[in-house]
């Protein structure tokens, strides 16, 4: 087949979501309360749920990454938390320890790369993993991680690089390593 036919996204690999529930905080008087949402553990894929990054879409859904390389889209985050739906969106990422939703797209900070995830056919799964930038050094040490992805109003990405002595301060016009 033509290359263009292969660049439109394929069938969903994880069509069935996992449903959990949440528990609303009993404290309703404080200025800051914490609700609890049950993780989808166990899940059909045997994916460990060591959460490592979360951000929200404008419509209230969340995106969450796990240290072992998965990204989930979470819906049902309402005033009751009775039907929280976890849809596996991506898998196979390398130690993602940061995630931001930028212009409706999930951007994940992996160990050594900033990756934007695209759902080309709107089936709720990432079909294309775009390398936004990987111009910084990735150390071989077991504690050399890229973490805490943030953005500023100008669209720049910021993150921390740990356990490395050969890290540039400015990677390009839009990626800064702290």
Image (cartoon, rainbow, N blue to C red):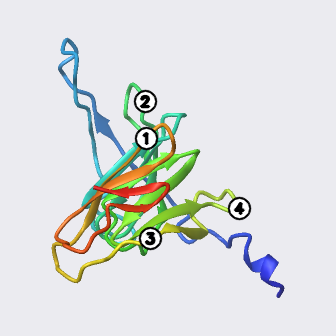
- Provide the residue designation for mark 2: 78
Q: Residue at x 19, y 73 (%)?
A: 165
Q: CA distance from mark 3 to mark 2?
A: 26 Å
- Provide the residue designation for mark 4: 121
Q: Mark 2 or mark 4, which is nearer to you? A: 4
- Provide the residue designation for mark 3: 91
Specify which label sits upstream in the sequence, 4 or 1. Answer: 4
Q: Indicate whether 102 appears above or below 67.
A: above
Specify which label sits upstream in the sequence, 2 or 1. Answer: 2
- Provide the residue designation for mark 1: 152
Q: Residue at x 39, y 68 (%)?
A: 44
The crowding category of the residue bearing disc 4, from other C-alpha atoms within 10 Å (few below 14, some 14 to 19, many at least 20), is some
Q: Mark 4 or mark 1, which is nearer to you? A: 1
Q: Mark 3 or mark 2, which is nearer to you? A: 3
Indicate the secondary structure of the residue bearing disc 2. Answer: loop
Q: Residue at x 28, y 57 (%)?
A: 52
Q: In this rendered view, identify the residue nearer to me: 157 or 64.
A: 157
């Amino acid at each position: 087949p033509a290359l263009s036919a292969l660049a439109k996204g394929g069938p969903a690999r994880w069509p069935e979501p996992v449903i959990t529930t949440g528990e609303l905080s009993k404290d309703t008087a404080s200025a800051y309360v914490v609700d609890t949402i049950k993780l989808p553990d166990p899940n059909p894929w045997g994916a460990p749920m060591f959460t490592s990054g979360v951000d929200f879409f404008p419509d209230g859904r969340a995106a969450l990454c796990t240290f072992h390389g998965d990204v989930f889209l979470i819906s049902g985050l309402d005033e009751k938390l009775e039907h929280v739906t976890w849809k596996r969106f991506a898998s196979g990422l390398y130690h993602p320890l940061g995630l931001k939703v930028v212009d409706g797209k999930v951007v994940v900070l992996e160990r050594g790369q900033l990756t934007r995830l695209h759902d080309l056919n709107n089936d709720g799964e990432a079909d294309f993993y775009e390398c936004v930038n990987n111009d910084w050094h990735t150390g071989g040490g077991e504690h050399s991680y890229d973490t805490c992805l943030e953005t500023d109003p100008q669209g720049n990405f910021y993150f921390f690089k740990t356990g490395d002595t050969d890290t540039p301060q400015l990677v390009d016009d839009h990626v800064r390593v702290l």
